[in-house]
């Protein structure tokens, strides 16, 4: 049982870290670009919000299969094919939870507008400099929200994991899969413990996030 | 640049042309790289756009900008904003909310090449009265305090030119009056040339040495402010509140009568109050409606202290019954310009003509209000 909990926390932590690194530049581009097709990119990023997780998992499974070019590329990088491995879960989770990070971070970037960046430019800050010293600090509430949502969403995922990860203990058997297993095998007690734990965890996440975000925002406005 | 150009004093030369919203902007003007130049005109005539173009924040279809011999922009060149040695003060102070006042002040200074000797923090803090604000968050400052920090932040970046976009417009009257003396002090103590946008004539009269007058995307005039305000061909002298400015040096303080002597081009003026140490330069605003004319000053016959000789250079009717008289102080008629608003009856009774010498009688109380 604990194996599943630890695996889940590990997956969610790594996924969140990758999401912040990948999602922030995407959010920045979506917030600042004037390209007419940027909303198309925005829609693609947001697809996992409405797409059934099994559909996403199915396509990922096909895309990452050993026979596909993408799968071969991934195999070259990771040393093995991705489906039914932990690395595969991370890749799938990043795609699945991307909108939960990109959206709040993009909103935060859009909220403070052009002015702080113009000011930074008149004070000799290069675009890269002002991104790190002005934009990121001002977007802190959005980054926090994105990180928390990305983490929590990854903790709770089920369908995508089942499609691309399967049910390998210690490798891809995360919490939600474990709960499903316990219910299937009529081990109600263990299912109760994990489910109640998730309930408390989710409540605490939302509470802490709301309080912290309010505090951050008050400090910036 | 050819060798002969090195003798010319540093200058800023700007030219921008392009379409902006409802009108075409087409301006070309240059001004010396010293003192304060006001970019003045009604709201929406393109002043802010020009300032943003000079900072590189906007780009016109056609543009050329040369600052002190360095090319910042032409058809092929466009130096990006962060590489232009400017200071920019926005209409709203726009301080960085995530940084303290001190960190805001140092933001640009830290990014300025150490090779150019700039102002140091302590000097700017003293000049702008920021000592008590240093550790505070910008969110805990009043509007006037914020704008002072923004000005300090801009000049600490060692600009070759300071651009200010209506720095006082977002402030109420009290905050404005609080900040004006600081701007006057900057004017007096710093060598940085300033170009500031304003639609408030009073601000320009108090601060500017030179004015670029704009209307509907075009430059109407670009002259030293004393000449521009009293230029018969421009609309400013025709306004009811037409005013001339006199700039002079304090030459004497009379403690007994509480009067200061101010030496202006063409005449000496006695001004109520202590204008500051002998040798300092002061400016007076003289409203046309506070100036009367007489042909002769009978000795001891008037309570008016200041009645310098002046020559009438032009006259224009103002409505049906008033006249705006354009004067140059001094018997030769070559001194500072002055305006007088008198009735048509007076003009006819005195039999005044362009070219006549008169005494311009200025109420002392009118001279006391600003200083």
Image (cartoon, rainbow, N blue to C red):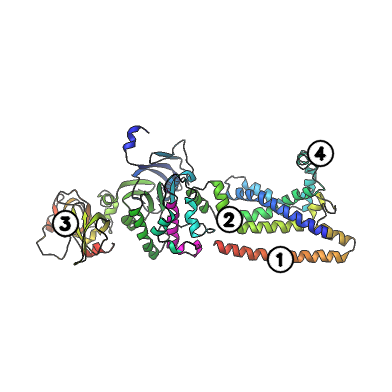
Q: x, y percentage for residue A128?
A: 56, 46
Name the mark nearer the viewer: 3 or 2.
2
Please say if the residues under marks 2 and 4 sit with CB atoms less than 8 Å apart.
no
Name the image quarter holding residue B278. Answer: bottom left
Name the mark nearer the viewer: 4 or 1.
1
Give the structural element (helix, strand or loop) at label 4.
loop
Q: Tell me, yes or no, whether dots 4 and 1 are on the same chain.
A: yes
Residue with the mark numbered 2: A137
Q: x, y percentage for residue B311?
A: 16, 51
Please say if the residues under marks 1 and 2 sit with CB atoms less than 8 Å apart.
no
Q: CA distance from mark 1 to mark 2?
A: 25 Å
Q: Earlier in the sequence, mark 2 or mark 4?
A: 4
Q: Tell me, yes or no, whether dots 4 and 3 are on the same chain.
A: no
Residue with the mark numbered 3: B308
What label sits on residue A204 in the rendered view? Answer: 1
Q: Nearer the viewer, residue B124 or A214?
A: B124
Give the structural element (helix, strand or loop) at label 2.
helix
Residue with the mark numbered 4: A67
Residue in the picture at 84% in, 51% down = A166
Q: x, y percentage for residue B127?
A: 38, 58
Please, which chain is the residue tagged with disc 2 on? A
Residue in the picture at 27% in, 64% down = B369
B311 sits left or right of B155 in the view = left
Check residue A164 for magenta coloring: no
The prevailing secondary structure element of the residues shown in magenta is helix
Q: Residues within 10 Å of mark 4 (few under 14, many from 20)?
A: few
Please say if the residues under marks 3 and 2 sit with CB atoms less than 8 Å apart.
no
Please say if the residues under marks 4 and 1 sit with CB atoms less than 8 Å apart.
no
Q: Earlier in the sequence, mark 1 or mark 2?
A: 2
What label sits on residue A123 in the rendered view? Answer: none
Q: Nearer the viewer, residue A2 or B50?
A: A2
Q: Tell me, yes or no, whether dots 3 and 1 are on the same chain.
A: no
């Amino acid at each position: 049982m604990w194996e599943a909990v630890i695996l889940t926390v590990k997956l969610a932590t790594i996924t969140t870290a990758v999401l912040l690194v990948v999602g922030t530049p995407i959010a920045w581009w979506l917030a600042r670009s004037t390209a007419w097709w940027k909303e198309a990119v925005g829609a693609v990023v947001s697809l996992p919000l409405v797409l059934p997780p099994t559909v996403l998992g199915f396509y990922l499974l096909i895309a990452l299969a050993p026979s596909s070019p993408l799968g071969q590329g991934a195999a070259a990088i990771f040393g093995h094919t991705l489906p039914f491995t932990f690395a595969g879960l991370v890749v799938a989770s990043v795609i699945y939870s991307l909108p939960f990070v990109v959206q709040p971070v993009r909103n935060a970037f859009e909220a403070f507008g052009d002015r702080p960046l113009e000011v930074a430019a008149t004070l000799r800050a290069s675009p890269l400099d002002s991104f790190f010293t002005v934009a990121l600090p001002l977007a802190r509430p959005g980054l926090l929200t994105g990180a928390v949502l990305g983490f929590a969403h990854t903790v709770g995922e089920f369908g995508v994991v089942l499609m691309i990860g399967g049910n390998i203990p210690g490798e891809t058997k995360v919490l939600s899969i474990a709960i499903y297993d316990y219910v299937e095998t009529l081990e109600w007690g263990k299912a109760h413990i994990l489910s109640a734990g998730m309930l408390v965890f989710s409540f605490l996440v939302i509470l802490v996030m709301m309080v912290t975000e309010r505090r951050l925002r008050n400090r910036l406005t | 640049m050819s060798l002969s150009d090195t003798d010319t004093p540093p200058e800023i030369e700007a030219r921008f042309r392009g379409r902006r919203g409802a009108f075409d902007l087409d301006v070309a003007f240059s001004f010396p790289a010293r003192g304060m130049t006001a970019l003045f005109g009604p709201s929406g005539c393109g002043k802010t756009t020009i300032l943003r173009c000079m900072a590189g924040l906007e780009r016109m279809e056609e543009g050329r900008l040369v600052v002190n011999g360095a090319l910042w922009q032409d058809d092929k060149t466009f130096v990006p904003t962060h590489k232009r040695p400017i200071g920019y003060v926005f209409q709203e102070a726009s301080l960085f909310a995530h940084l303290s006042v001190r960190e805001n002040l140092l933001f640009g200074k830290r990014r300025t090449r150490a090779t150019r000797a700039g102002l140091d923090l302590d000097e700017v803090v003293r000049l702008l009265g920021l000592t008590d604000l240093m550790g505070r968050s910008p969110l805990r400052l009043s509007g006037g305090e914020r704008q002072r920090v923004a000005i300090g932040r801009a000049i600490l970046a060692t600009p070759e030119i300071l651009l200010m976009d209506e720095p006082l417009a977002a402030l109420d009257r009290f905050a404005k009056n609080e900040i004006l003396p600081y701007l006057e002090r900057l004017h007096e103590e710093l060598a940085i040339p300033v170009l500031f946008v304003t639609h408030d004539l009073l601000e320009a009269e108090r601060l500017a040495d030179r004015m670029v007058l704009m209307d509907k995307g075009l430059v109407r005039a670009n002259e030293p402010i004393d000449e521009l305000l009293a230029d018969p061909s421009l609309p400013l002298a025709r306004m009811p509140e037409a005013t001339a400015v006199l700039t002079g040096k304090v030459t004497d303080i009379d403690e007994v009568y509480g009067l200061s002597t101010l030496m202006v081009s063409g005449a000496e003026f006695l001004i109520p109050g202590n204008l500051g140490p002998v040798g300092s330069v002061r400016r007076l605003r003289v409203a046309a409606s506070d100036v009367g004319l007489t042909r002769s000053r009978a000795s001891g016959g008037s309570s008016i202290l200041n009645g310098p000789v002046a020559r009438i250079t032009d006259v224009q009717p103002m409505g049906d019954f008033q006249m705006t008289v354009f004067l140059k102080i001094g018997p030769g008629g070559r001194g500072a310009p002055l305006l007088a608003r008198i009735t048509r009856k007076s003009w006819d009774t005195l039999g005044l003509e362009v070219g006549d010498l008169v005494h311009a009688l200025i109420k002392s109380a009118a001279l006391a209000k600003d200083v």
